[in-house]
Amino acid sequence: MAVSERCLADWSKRKRMQQTAHLRGASMAVFRNSSVLLVRRARPPLADLWSLPGGKQERGESAEQTALREVHEETGVTALIAGKLGVHTALFNMTGALGDPGPASIEIDVFYGTCSTGAAPVAADDASDAEWVPLDALDGYDLTEGAAELILEAAALLADKTTGRRSIGYPT
């Protein structure tokens, strides 16, 4: 490759990176007994994949509020936060999704906790299905990238948590 072609390729790559949308969101691994709450995504870029309930952070909303709101909007389940797992960065091609063309980087604050009731989830919003999935059945689901690891890590943290539980609930 000639020097001018390499410079053009480098410039194009830098330009694409600058055009990448950077979004914030939150999700939550909600546990009941030995099951985790999962939703099947209805829209691109993750259509038909199973994932933790979650979504885009609204202006003025904390990450905790986002996680609880999204769980409730997508499943009808009221959750309680026990802790924060960390921040997961996901890269998507958003073409056709949310009306935004091109690549996007989404930083997702991931929380874990339990539900306040034994209510059956009902898919809503951008989820086409929602269900309690036994942890030993995760292999049978087409999960979003990294979801299985996050779920298992959150389950271990929740199991180890014995004191100092912080309960933040979705306002009803």
Image (tube, helix red, strand yellow):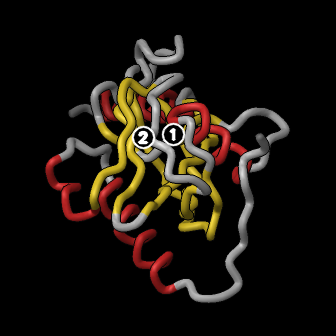
**At x 32% / y 34%, what residue is drawn?**
6
Foreground residue, 129 or 92? Answer: 129
Can you tell which mark lies on residue 91? Answer: 2
Cα–Cα span, label 2 and label 1: 5 Å
Disc 2 residue type (three-letter): Leu
Q: Residue at x 57, y 60 (%)?
A: 111
Question: Which quadrant of the figure contains the C terminus?
Answer: top right
147 shown above or below 50: below
Q: Amino acid at mark 1?
A: Ser
Instruction: Inspect this view and state whether residue 7 appears.
Output: no
Classify mark 1: residues with Cα within 10 Å, few (<14), some (14-19) or many (20+).
some
Residue 15 sits above or below residue 141 on the image: above
Quadrant location of the N terminus in the rendered image? top left
Q: Position of residue 151 (x, y in %)?
A: 38, 62
Tell me residue 13's x, y (percent). 42, 33
> Which residue bears the numbered disc 1?
105
Q: Residue 10 or 54: which is nearer the viewer?
A: 54
- Asked if disc 2 and disc 1 are in contact, CB closer than 8 Å, the reply is yes
Question: Does the image show residue 110?
Answer: yes
Which residue ends up furthest to the right in the rendered image? 60
Q: Is residue 138 left or right of residue 83?
A: left
Judged from the image, the secondary structure of the residue bearing numbered disc 1 is: strand
